[in-house]
Image: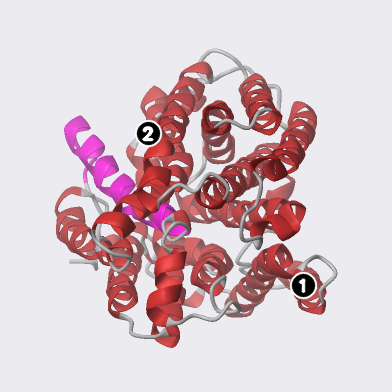
Amino acid sequence: MLDTDIQRSPARPTNRRRWAALALLASAQLMLVLDVTVVNVALPDISRALGLSRGQLPWVMTSYTVMFGGLMLLGGRVADLFGPRRLTLIGLAVFTGSSLLCGLSGGAGALLVGRALQGVGAAVMSPAALATVTPLFTGTDRGKALGVWSALAGVGSALGVILGGVLTSQAGWRWVFTINVPIGVALLVAIPLVVPASRVSGTAERDLDAAGAILVTVGTGAAIFGLVNAGGHGWSAASTILAVLVAAAVWTAFAVLERRVRRPLLHVALLRRPAVAAGGFLMLAATGLMVGGLFVGSFALQHAYRYSALRVGIAFLPVAVATVIGAQAGSRALARVSARYVAVTGLALVTAGYALAASWTPVAALVGGLSIATLGIGATFVTAFTAALTNVAPAEAGLRSALVNTFHELGGAVGVAVLSTVAGATLVADHPAVADFGRVFAVGAACAAGALAVAAVLVPRVPPAPEAA
């Protein structure tokens, strides 16, 4: 029963059960990350089938990320108050049901509502799932667990493109969404049997900062909308400027409110802690470079190289594999050297990979460059998670997880906005030239180099510890 989250504190699970719990929760998290990019390749088919207008098409992606990122902090705080396993199951149920709605949709309205509800479920489940994982492991085992979780952040984005291409070509675009349904139902059955419940305060209902939750949701949602809108309409568009101004104003109001309420949703001082600030920045930079590169890369393969959806998916296999290798290598390196060295090395690889993709025009150079970049991004992801969650108290695990994941969604929006703005008319040209994408990847290389310079100063230079393995 879900009520066990509050009623009791279970005995520490066996080693085998802990890793089984991680496998189930990681599978659930992977579905959420996949759905950020899985529709990339399927968008042309979706547009033809449902008669989407040019203005509606971006919202197939944006409605998910706006709700996912906007509600993340609220989801993390509620997980801390009411029990992370309980919120994991609730979020997973919402995500699974809304995936079915997307798959069965007969028009733009139903699809966009379904995508928004997917984002709501993801925002509830994602921080809760990570908050469930963190207390299960200690010492070097926690480092290994965070290495697995970190790999999901990057490999899920690459696998989304691969899976989207395969499903769209072989089964139809509706399977991009409905494949979540049987997996989600199986996880809803398995998680309560394997994942232990956690003890939370019985007075949780009185501790939720509702006003702060509304403000941070509106502010983050407006920021993500403005960034994504900039990619399609430009930074000088009135809709972009208004959204960014609203985000800034609402975030300012949120910061003022949190200093005055008795039990704030977020202690703003938390963001000034070196480890949390470094983790948030690394997640923002790594996700922006990952999602932005995949967005431009998949577009280049389809429109400049004339690849089919299936060929695009197959072409990105090395990118996905490189992300996993980078995350595992980064996890091992963190046991031996400080987080600063791992972050700087990872971002140096990203810079080199983007530079390779910008220099030559063959497909091998594009895919090879992105693979080198994601090797570094995988290492950067694990550094971000480890920095932000090392030695976190159980009562704060959901909130810190939500902070990291919020920067993940913001980073994706920033990456797409910046690189699609640089691409400009190339993205709407009927027959774009391969060389036209070179300047886009050159800007990506410059952004990675800038992130490297910031990380060299911002990421704490501390010796490795068992908790940061």
Residue 270's x, y, as percent? 68, 50
- Number of the label disc, if any, that sits on residue 414: none
Q: Are marks 2 and 1 in contact (CB under 8 Å)?
A: no
Residue at 40%, 68% in the rendered image: 45
In the picture, residue 417 is in which quadrant?
bottom right
Query: Which residues lie in the magenta part?
Result: 11-36
Mark 1, Cα crowd under 10 Å, few <14 / some 14-19 / many 20+, is: many
Amino acid type for the residue under numbered disc 1: Thr
- The alpha-carbon separation of the residues under discs 2 and 1 comes to 39 Å
Residue 460's x, y, as percent? 71, 28
Give the residue at the far front of this rendering: 431
Secondary structure mostly taken by the magenta-highlighted segment of the chain: helix
Q: Can residue 152 be seen in this view?
A: yes
Give the residue at the far right of this rendering: 236
- Number of the label disc, if any, that sits on residue 145: 2
Question: In the picture, which quadrant includes the N terminus?
Answer: bottom left
Residue 310's x, y, as percent? 35, 48
Q: Nearer the viewer, residue 312 or 18?
A: 312
Amino acid type for the residue under numbered disc 2: Ala
Picture layout, residue 80 above or below residue 466? below
SS label for mark 2: helix
Q: Is residue 124 visible?
A: no
Which residue matches tag 1? 240
Picture layout, residue 385 above or below residue 179? above
